[in-house]
Amino acid sequence: CWAYPFTIHKDKIPEEKDLKPGVQFDILGGPDTGKDSKGDRGFLAWDPQDNDKTSLQFELQFPQMSSNAYRNPGEAGDTTLNVGDWVASLSGNTAGVEPYINELVGQRIIIPVHSELKKSMSNLNPSPAKVDAYKIVRFIEVEIIDGGIDLTSYDPKVMAKIIRLDPAECDVKP
């Protein structure tokens, strides 16, 4: 499926039985947000080599990059994004991508959900040799909320509401 380069920890997603329409949450709720952040803000890099702001801008404009540019840093040659795969964390300054996220307000988008963040994981593809990477455990469909985007603070946020868990077009089971 075509996914967007955000991720949220599985513990921040309500269970299906507890899912209520309109519940809002921060889809940048990665483990290293806040004033002590080391640059990991819940953004993804589909290809570990393309780990910069310009690549993120393209990923936000073209969700098909999750299909045609993805490289699993944990498995050489794996270029299909699935549950169980690793995805490189996009580190560093993401200033300047807010206009691209604003273009997504009101749209339904699919994002990966992760269970863990592995620091300095060996990248089994071309450089870099080490990457921080998220383990993907499911996908969710969300809608980004108008007025819910703030990337300028120490605790950046992109607020969204859950539309559905495990969208059929991703053909995955939790």
Image (tube, grey):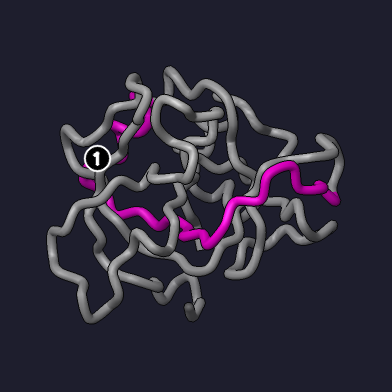
Q: Residue at x 60, y 42 (%)?
A: 89
Q: Amino acid at mark 1?
A: Val
Apparent side of residue 98 relative to residue 129 in the rendered image (left or right): left
Image height of 56 relative to 131, above or below? above
Q: Quadrant of residue 169?
A: bottom left
Question: Label 1 crowding class (10 Å Cα cut-off): few <14, some 14-19, many 20+?
Answer: some
Q: Is residue 118 magenta?
A: yes
Position of residue 68 measured from the top left corner of the image (x, y, whole percent): 65, 51
Q: Nearer the viewer, residue 92 or 165?
A: 92
Position of residue 60 measured from the top left corner of the image (x, y, whole percent): 45, 38
Apparent side of residue 13 relative to residue 10 in the rendered image (left or right): left
On the question of residue 26 being in view, the answer is: yes
Position of residue 45 measured from the top left corner of the image (x, y, whole percent): 61, 41
Image height of 32 relative to 135, above or below? above
Image height of 116 relative to 65, above or below? below
What's the magenta region? 98-124
Q: Residue at x 74, y 42 (%)?
A: 120
Q: Is residue 100 magenta?
A: yes
On the question of residue 61 being in view, the answer is: no
Task: Name the residue that disc number 1 marks.
Answer: 105
Q: Residue at x 84, y 47 (%)?
A: 125
Q: Nearer the viewer, residue 12 or 129?
A: 12
Secondary structure state at the residue bearing disc 1: loop
Apparent side of residue 22 relative to residue 171 in the rendered image (left or right): left
Q: Residue at x 48, y 68 (%)?
A: 138
Q: How many marks?
A: 1
Position of residue 90 measured from the top left corner of the image (x, y, whole percent): 58, 36
